[in-house]
Image (spheres, helix red, strand yellow):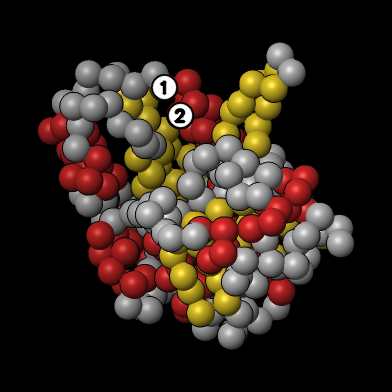
Amino acid sequence: MSATIIDGKAFAETVRAQVADHVARLKAGHGVTPGLAVVLVGEDPASQVYVRSKGKQTLEAGMASFEHKLPAETSEADLVALVKQLNADPKVHGILVQLPLPPHLDSDLVINTIDPAKDVDGFHISNVGLLGTGQKAMVPCTPLGCLMLLRDHLGSLSGKTAVVVGRSNIVGKPMAQLLLGDSCTVTIAHSRTQDLPAVCRTADILVAAVGRPEMVKGDWVKPGATVIDVGINRIERDGKTKLVGDVDFVSAAAVAGAITPVPGGVGPMTIACLLANTLTACCRANGLPEPEGLTA
């Protein structure tokens, strides 16, 4: 069996086009422009790349982009004050504080200072609780992107057995909640799971989000399963740096029914869903209908 490749890059382009179309209609019909504020503290190179990309795609979607770049030594009080200022700014509908923060800053404190209605990363404890109880929430971007890819490829997820490998607050736990919301039977597996390969082989939907290069092998995959690889790992191979996922792509693709590649799978969906969340937040703030197909 040779798996269908789920093209996250192409799907993300479709999502961004939907967002841009809705933004244009908001501007023309209601005089409203969604605004995204991104806060970067310090000089982390990977974070700088992400922030540049987010700003570029925000503007391309017709939204307002507000970037706040602060020195690494910024005090917690000053950062919290900035977040509160953005909470009060009616032009800002989404706030994202780029992680990781420098070690002297309390990430949980800062994230929980964000107005939950503007928390487009979906990390605020209120949004975590709303998602966990099946209520309307801002949903973390990467799991939301995975859910969109799954719905697009499989249609209804109801009744399917899903295994999520990884229990992070950013991907694993919210991914499991979203799959439960779509009526899957869900197992969260992790480093202490006994006979992890056997657990994975039960999955109609297998989501790998552990940050370990090529950990999930082809013989862990149920024939015909849909495999979503969230991992992005840099490894040295044949004298070159290569990006690989948490799944051994070659062996898994020989067994799976469908699989996301790395790069070009889940990764592009994350920023696309950030734009979608900002649009959703703007619609909610203005009492307007939410965009169809862009929320959980």
User: Total label count?
Assistant: 2
Residue named by callout 2:
47
Element type where label 1 sits in the image: loop
Q: Position of residue 113 (x, y in %)?
A: 20, 49
Quadrant containing the N terminus in the rendered view:
bottom right
Q: Quadrant of residue 155?
A: bottom right
Front residue of 242 and 296: 242
150 lies left or right of 84: right
Q: Residue reaching furthest top?
A: 239
29 up-or-down from 172: above or below? below
Element type where label 2 sits in the image: helix
Q: Image point 22% across, 46% down: which residue?
A: 108
Q: Image point 42% across, 70% down: which residue?
A: 177
Residue named by callout 1:
44
Q: Image point 47% across, 21% down: which residue?
A: 45
58 lies left or right of 191: right
Q: Residue reaching furthest right?
A: 1
Q: Position of residue 187 (x, y in %)?
A: 46, 70
Kind of residue sitting beneath label 1: Asp
Kind of residue sitting beneath label 2: Ser
Front residue of 226 and 46: 226
